Image (cartoon, grey):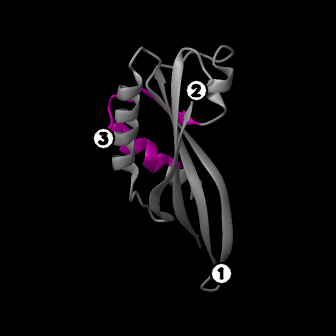
Amino acid sequence: MREELYTAIVAKLKQDVPEVVHIDLWNHNVEFIEQEEVWSRPAVFVEIGTISWSPFHGKMLRGKGQVRTHVVTDWLEGGQHAAWNLSNKIRKVLTGLCGDSFNGMELVTTDTNHNHEDILESIDSYDVRYLLE
């Protein structure tokens, strides 16, 4: 179910947001930007958060959790407008995304990370419902 969610997000972004040139799984990428391999920007890193499970119809499980997109752009004077527009485009594409084992993807929080000199990181958190058979 996590693999299906991640694969669906990547496919949707590649199809509908071609200006995103790098997509990967989140691994605190911006915190270690000087130590990592260089990745092109704009980039989106997908972070799948904790999933809470409860029994559902016998042997199935229903889950609730969050997935975060870390949208990373180069910092340029006035570049925040382009970064926020890109985040908004991504939100429109991902809202309502569903698959066989997940649905209900809805934006719940937005944050901006200002702790980096040369990049801007916009973090959007989405609630997601899961089903495990």
Is 19 located above or below residue 117 in the figure?
below
Return the x and y of residue 46 as percentages of the image width and height.
Answer: 54, 41
Residue 86 image-quadrant placement: top left
Q: Which residue is mark 2?
A: 114
* Of the two numbered discs 3 and 2 in the rendering, the one whose residue sits closer to the viewer: 2
Looking at marks 3 and 2 on the same chain, the residue that comes earlier in the sequence is marked by 3
**CA gap, disc 3 to disc 2?**
27 Å
Return the x and y of residue 53 as percentages of the image width and height.
Answer: 67, 70
Task: Please state which amino acid type lies under the numbered disc 2.
Answer: His
**CA gap, disc 1 to disc 2?**
45 Å
Position of the C terminus, as image quadrant, is bottom right
* Of the two numbered discs 1 and 2 in the rendering, the one whose residue sits closer to the viewer: 2
Which numbered tag is attached to residue 59? 1
The residue stretch that appears in magenta: 6-25
The answer to whether 20 appears left or right of 5 in the picture is left
**Are discs 1 and 2 less than 8 Å apart at CB?**
no
Front residue (pair 5, 128): 128
Within 10 angstroms of label 2, few (less than 14), some, or many (20 or more) residues? few
Looking at marks 1 and 2 on the same chain, the residue that comes earlier in the sequence is marked by 1
Q: Which residue is mark 3?
A: 16
* Of the two numbered discs 3 and 1 in the rendering, the one whose residue sits closer to the viewer: 3
Residue 78 image-quadrant placement: top left
The answer to whether 97 appears left or right of 119 in the picture is left
Looking at marks 3 and 1 on the same chain, the residue that comes earlier in the sequence is marked by 3
